[in-house]
Amino acid sequence: MNGIKKRSVALSLIAVIVVLLIVGRAYLPYWVTDYLNAQITALNGYGGSIQDVDIHLWRGAGSIHGLEIRKHGGERNEPFVAAETIDLSVEWSALLDGAVVGAIDIHGADLNFSKRQHGQGENWERVVNAWSPLDINRLALHGGRVAYIDYSAEPNIHLYIDDIDAQVTNLRNVTDGDIALPSHLSIKGQSVGGGELTVDGRLNMIKSIPDFDINLELQDASLPAFNDYTKAAAAVDFESGTVGLFSELAAADGRLTGYVKVVATDVSLVNLRKGGQNPINALWESAVSVFMEVFENQPEDQFAFSIPIEGNLDDPDRGTWAAFLSIFDNAFGQAFTRDTEGRIHFEELLED
């Protein structure tokens, strides 16, 4: 009789535990949603919410849906950061190397910067750590957009990279432990004006001051698409032409070296005199047009310059005079190539 009672008590206890687990599992997404929303609410100067959370305990994963964070008193309707879905999971492949780390896949990201909306001064790491208790070893963006908007200009300046497909791997150096730059970065996207962006590089994000070796190419963007920016910055309005931007940057122990090269081809400026515009602006654009025509490489019909970058990572020296002289190198010497030059090497910084 006592045995029957003991079995009955045990079965009742198991039933209670199972019910509690089922109820707890059903309530867990609501609790996590409330917890993450509280972390967003705690931000100073920013606010927002997530819509809901899915939990997949059986595969150690979860999904956050409908993230939106806005700056309090923001200038326009664009959020500071938004995402359709953020998938967080254990990176199972890293377990084979004895590491328990996480992976994040962000779908439909939308990040908007402006002069007053830049995110500096906030503890974003606390928010990210709340989302995932694991160190992140892989981060990927699928279909993202990054934009810079200047509302103080008229018309507003709107520069962006769209259709971003990006990934950085081995952030926690789970593999390749003896390599100076163990993480790999890859970015592809499309800029304003239809330019094709490609970024490829190696990183070491574990160091307090990260080391990196990065190549960047932006090919065949339409110059007139940048007119809002060029008119505000230099009072220049393009009628036609394409532009490419090419850069190699390497940093080791806080020391930076590299260059940024700009190559514009088939350029023509809008003739303001035909529209009865401000004569001073017309005179200025005429002078710029003549300068670019005289100092372009005639066989290639391209105007170009290269800005050398050297010094400390937090405040590098940009060689303005060298950049100006490079205009003549492109015009009267060999035309600058429309790609990266392969002359910046991370290993050389280690030897200095």
Image (cartoon, grey):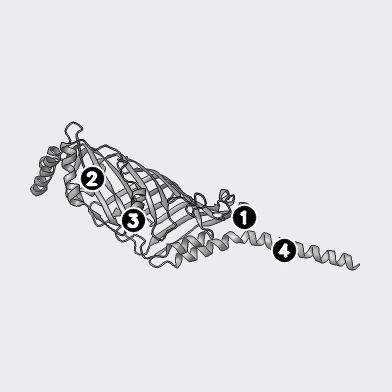
Q: Nearer the viewer, mark 2 or mark 4?
A: 2
Q: Residue at x 34, y 46 (%)?
A: 345
Q: Nearer the viewer, mark 4 or mark 1?
A: 1
Q: Which residue is mark 1?
A: 57
Q: Are marks 4 and 1 in contact (CB under 8 Å)?
A: no
Binning the other alpha carbons within 10 Å of mark 4 as few (below 14), some (14 to 19) or many (20 upward) gives: few
Q: Which residue is mark 2?
A: 306
Q: Which residue is mark 4?
A: 17
Asked which secondary structure carries label 2, the reply is strand
Residue 55 vertical position relative to residue 272 in the rendered view, above or below:
below
* Residue 187 on image: x %, y %: 40, 45
**Label annotation for residue 113:** 3
Binning the other alpha carbons within 10 Å of mark 3 as few (below 14), some (14 to 19) or many (20 upward) gives: many
Kindly identify the amino acid type of the residue bearing the numbered disc 3. Answer: Phe
Q: CA distance from mark 3 to mark 1?
A: 36 Å
Quadrant location of residue 305? Answer: top left
Asked which secondary structure carries label 1, the reply is helix
* Residue 220 on image: x %, y %: 29, 38
User: Which image quarter is the N terminus in?
Assistant: bottom right
Kindly identify the amino acid type of the residue bearing the numbered disc 2. Answer: Ser
* Residue 200 on image: x %, y %: 39, 44
Asked which secondary structure carries label 4, the reply is helix
Q: Nearer the viewer, mark 2 or mark 1?
A: 2
Q: Earlier in the sequence, mark 4 or mark 1?
A: 4
Kindly identify the amino acid type of the residue bearing the numbered disc 4. Answer: Ile
Binning the other alpha carbons within 10 Å of mark 1 as few (below 14), some (14 to 19) or many (20 upward) gives: few
Q: CA distance from mark 4 to mark 3?
A: 49 Å
User: Does residue 260 appear in this view?
Assistant: yes
Q: CA distance from mark 2 to mark 3?
A: 26 Å
Q: Is residue 19 left or right of residue 94?
A: right
